[in-house]
Image: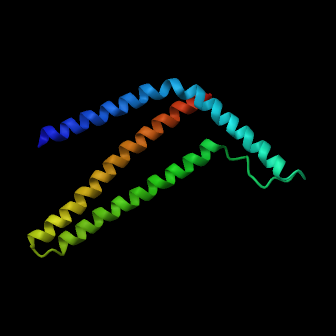
Amino acid sequence: MKAKYQLKLAFLLLIMASAVILVRPGMATATAQLDLLNQTLEETSKTVNPSGTQNISTTTKLPTFVGRIVNGLFALAGVIFLALSMLGGVLWMTAGGNEEKVKRAQGFIFGGVNGMIIMFFAYAMVYLVLQALNAGVGS
């Protein structure tokens, strides 16, 4: 059973290393595309309302906006996994020695902890990619 988890961990690390290696060449293209998209948004905001007042805010750049959404999703996932772990703890405390309820509670706790671990690695990967993109942009 332990070898199965070691194999999964090795596979996860291999995927993470591959992602870092494969993302690096495409950063220049992605940066150019983001700049073009930001420029297009600014032009669109001026075209939509020619009077000079802009209805579309161009002060927040697209990467910042996407980063806020990603951080919000990670926060929501963290709350969900924490709630699952707490629910498992409450179920375990109220099981009264019933083995079936204890197994169910352990499943909730195990799922919550696994979710937190997966979320942590996903956040680390997203952070790494965003930092590499920022380094490529030169900001």
* Residue nearest the viewer, comparing 53 with 138: 53
Q: Does residue 26 appear in this view?
A: yes
Reply above or below: 36 against 64.
above
Where residue 89 appears, x then y in whole percent?
A: 23, 67
The residue sitting at 88% across, 50% down in the picture is 50
The residue sitting at 42% across, 29% down in the picture is 20
Q: Quadrant of residue 122?
A: top left
Reply above or below: 134 against 79.
above
* Residue nearest the viewer, comparing 42 with 88: 42
Q: Quadrant of residue 138?
A: top right
The residue sitting at 45% across, 56% down in the picture is 75
The residue sitting at 39% across, 56% down in the picture is 78
Q: Quadrant of residue 4?
A: top left
Where residue 26 appears, x then y in whole percent?
A: 53, 27
Where residue 106 appears, x then y in whole percent?
A: 18, 62
Give the residue furthest to the right: 51
Q: Quadrant of the N terminus?
A: top left
